[in-house]
Amino acid sequence: MSKQKVLILGAGAAGSVVANKLAREFRRDIARDKLEITILDRNDVNINQGGFTFLPFGLYTPDDITRPRRMLISPRVKAVFGVDGEVKRVDLKKKEVTVESGKTYAYDYLVIATGCRADVDQIPGLSKDFNSFYTSIDDALRLGEKLKNFDSGKVVILTARMPIPCPGAPGKFTVLLDAYLRYIRGEDIRKDVEITYLLPIELIGPPAYNAIISSVFEERDIELIRKFVVDEVNAGQKEVVSVDGEKIEYDLLVTIPPYTNTKAMLDSGITDENGWIPVDKHTLQYHRGSESYEEVYALGDIGPAEILKTGIGAHYQAYIVAQNLINEIRGNGSKVSYLGETGCPFVGSRYTSRTRGEAYIATWNYEKPLEPFKATELGWFLYRTYYYIYWDGAIKAVM
Ligand SMILES: Cc1cc2nc3c(=O)[nH]c(=O)nc-3n(C[C@H](O)[C@H](O)[C@H](O)COP(=O)(O)OP(=O)(O)OC[C@H]3O[C@@H](n4cnc5c(N)ncnc54)[C@H](O)[C@@H]3O)c2cc1C
């Protein structure tokens, strides 16, 4: 039998887990040159984006939330990073992927996990006053510097469009901002700062999540404006204008920009009407109208709008995709199904000299809605610790 080739695009939260799980399962086949697993990425540093929310407040450092990819991917996997790993085009009919350097990779099985990207230019005027913790380590640190020197005025936190990765993160940031101004900078600062949170939809997450975060906002004097769909940012006037003509003034605007698919996927013509990769929500196999490619899987942030974009979800999906590849390659006739397991960590308060940290890892799936919950101090410690376990536990696919 000729050597089987599994090609994984993207070595982030989802792709790394698939690669490492397959490498462990197929170690003998790889050693006997019967199977090859290749993973491509445009760069060689893995960033845990979940840590961006904490960076402006000094709760993690860039070192905590980054690792060289070579430390994370099994040596049994052929890892290609840089121009030879930067995907330019995917041809599902030819079963071939072309990268920036011009090289091509053929595959028997393809796993697409190149995530999504911020698209600041979708909102007129936004790039003229763009502050964000969402988009990069540098942006999050720059925002942190601004917050260190922000003594009075109005901070507006704007989520421009849905879907975004981790829809709970803007709320988490807002709670941490309140605690930072109140307990780290001091009560005198917080009473001179107004905080307003603008949301384009009705609810922050599932109803049980929305209920608890809304009550925390009320308790902390954070204004919440729902269904505010931004039309433009007027940087000169320092105001955000909605599609209904409502104007909200600000002194500091913190924006979660719109998100879209990577250029490579859009250019390949394999996306759905919303620009995402269309997969069956249970099998995660490619399916667009009458077009199906059973050997192609897509997971993580690149998936269709009906699948929530979270690291927790990406992790569950990676186990499903890896297991179905194992079943398929071994020819054992079994299949496992993604049931929509996902989640969003909730933060009710942070640990300071005056307050105890409170958090809860909220999870739910397609069938089972999130139940009402209470954040705990243990939840806070677990959540904080998870960022260190992430590298050797989650990404290496041992938990
Ligand atoms: C501010 C913020 C806070 C978050 N907080 C949480 C949280 O608390 N909990 C949670 O569960 N989730 C959280 N998330 C979401 C989580 O980070 C994502 O859902 C997760 O990273 C998705 O995994 P992925 O593998 O699909 O994408 P990514 O992890 O983004 O990986 C995609 C990979 O593809 C690579 N790539 C992109 N384009 C190309 C190309 N053309 N060629 C080759 N490689 C390419 C990238 O370099 C990257 O390594 C947060 C996200 C943000 C932005």
Image (cartoon, grey):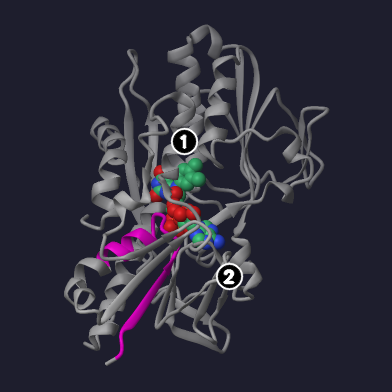
Residue nearest the observer in this picture, 30 or 180: 30
Q: Position of residue 285 (x, y in %)?
A: 43, 78
In the image, the residue with mark 1 has its CB under 8 Å from the nearest atom of ligand 1: yes
Residue 207 visible: no
Residue nearest the observer in this picture, 83 or 275: 83
Q: Residue at x 68, y 43 (%)?
A: 228
The three-letter code of the residue at mark 2 reads Gly
Please tell me in which quadrant of the rendered image residue 337 appears: bottom left
Residue 316 visible: yes
Q: Residue at x 32, y 30 (%)?
A: 358
Q: Secondary structure at mark 1?
A: helix
Q: Position of residue 74 (x, y in %)?
A: 26, 59
Q: Is residue 231 above or below residue 268?
A: above
Sequence order check: which comes first, mark 1 or mark 2?
1
Q: Position of residue 355 (x, y in %)?
A: 34, 18
Q: Residue at x 46, y 33 (%)?
A: 215
Q: Which residue is mark 1?
A: 53
Furthest-bottom residue in this view: 1
**Which residues lie in the magenta part?**
2-21
- The local crowd at label 2, few if under 14, some if 14 to 19, many if 20 or more residues have their Cα within 10 Å, is few
Residue nearest the observer in this picture, 319 or 187: 319
Q: Which residue is mark 2?
A: 102
**Mark 1, mark 2: which one is toward the viewer?**
2
Q: Secondary structure at mark 2?
A: loop
Answer whether labels 1 and 2 touch (C-beta < 8 Å): no
Q: Quadrant of the C terminus?
A: bottom left
Q: Is residue 14 magenta?
A: yes
Q: Quadrant of the N terminus?
A: bottom left
Q: CA distance from mark 1 to mark 2?
A: 37 Å
